[in-house]
Image (cartoon, rainbow, N blue to C red):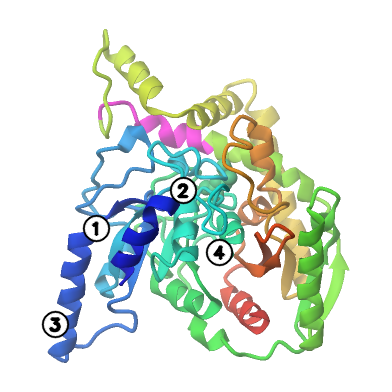
Amino acid sequence: AYLDRINTVEDKVEAYVNVFEEDAIKEAKRVDEKRAKGEELSELAGIPIAIKDNICTKGTKTTCSSKMLYNFESPYDATVSDKLKKDDLIILGKLNMDEFAMGSSTENSYFKKTKNPWDITRVPGGSSGGSAAAIAAREAVFTLGSDTGGSIRQPASYCGVVGMKPTYGAVSRYGLVAFASSLDQIGPITKDVKDMAMALQSIVGYDPMDSSSAKIDYPKYIQAIGQDVKGMKIALPREYFSDGIQNDIKEKVLEVAKEFEKLGAIVEEVDLKTTSYALPAYYLISSAEASSNLARYDGVKYGYRAKEYDNLLDLYKQTRDEAFGTEVKRRIMLGTYALSSGYYDAYYKKAQQVRTIIKNEFDQVFNNYDIILTPTVPATAFEVGAKIDNPIEMYMNDVCTVPVNIAGLPALSMNCGFDQKGLPIGVQFIGKAFDESTLLKMAYAYE
Ligand code: GLN
């Protein structure tokens, strides 16, 4: 049924880079046989899902929507892919994204531009635009995305679905193609909050293959579903309701706060004065790390290689010039500059110091509150092409989401209404580190 759905809507939505039609049917039959034999199966066995194309899947391509990796097949599975395969979930295909996860609209893909299923003249957000659009268009039961500065939550908001960036360290990054290693985190996109609890459970956990993976006892998230929210303390940070935020978004998010008051929660305004520093710190840190991480694409080890070159250095240069898109080149240049001697202290080190200050301010708020409630994005989905030539305007999309990555916290975005054009509006719940359960409990109570 899901493959039929993909065939029906995909020429309009273009969420997938690759659909594994034959493999998916074969896998489904294999799970059916297991079931018929009475073999023990996981709770999610047989469920059709799809994965962002920067997460490695053995035996099929992982392109990062880049010309650089157009033919790359990873020799191993990412830990999350391995977990899902072991639990007998069925991988329908790989999803479109901004090249190397850099972008907020999925327009930076080398292959295609994914459309927003609510209005196909508009972008689905990004960089996990394929992952969010596929859920909005019902082309998978759940999908995986990655979130470095908002790439799960922003497209989830644009597409009216549920997206979660888990705490840094809760989901293994082994086999996630690195963009900015200190910020990257894999998470699910689902149609509702209960699905989110189950999808999250299927991918969290300690992994010795990821040095930043957290060795803790992970809770049973499903237990959070249906719990009472009476007495929960919610912080509304003033800085997230400033002039830069679309009015009907502010109104809808404040209505969410009112709903919680009706349910017996306590809502109070707070200050998060460092909010405006998060975006510049993010673009410095993420570009610096990206410039280092992307140094490995030289035409020798992976993917694309230039056809004509004079010598080894020229091979590197020609390959990188021909196979990286404009935005990726921009980040590499920015990051290389910020890390170069003489500038390191002024930019990279300064950004790292700002990072600590931002994290401390969040910690202080969480001394007195259970969650922070904000808009997910400053504006609803924009038209295809509207911001592609204006990088700064594109980066502004991330003001409400990047502070969370900077601080390593978990956050969930879900729909809370529609604007005057009928486009989905998202509300963001930010939680304490490793307290995904509270986010799910609050989100489910609102839903
Ligand atoms: N839009 C942000 C960027 O372009 C976030 C990307 C992400 O989270 N992968 O860097």
Upstream in the sequence, badge 4 or badge 3? 3
Q: Is residue 256 above or below residue 169?
A: below
**Residue under label 4:** 167
- Image height check: is 75 above or below 221? above
Q: Is residue 298 magenta?
A: yes
Residue range of the region highlighted in magenta in the rendering: 289-300
> Which numbered dot is residue 114?
2
Estimate how packed mark 4 is, as few (under 14), some (14 to 19) or many (20 or more) residues with alpha carbons within 10 Å: many
Q: Which residue is mark 1?
A: 20
Query: Residue under circle 3?
Result: 33
Q: CA distance from mark 4 to mark 2?
A: 28 Å
Q: Nearer the viewer, mark 4 or mark 3?
A: 3
Q: Mark 3 or mark 1, which has the lower sequence index? A: 1
Asked if residue 14 lies left or right of residue 155, the reply is left
Q: Earlier in the sequence, mark 3 or mark 2?
A: 3
Is residue 285 at least partly visible in the picture? yes
Q: Ligand 1, what quadrant?
A: top right
Residue type at tag 2 = Thr
Q: Nearer the viewer, mark 4 or mark 2?
A: 2
Q: Are marks 4 and 1 in contact (CB under 8 Å)?
A: no
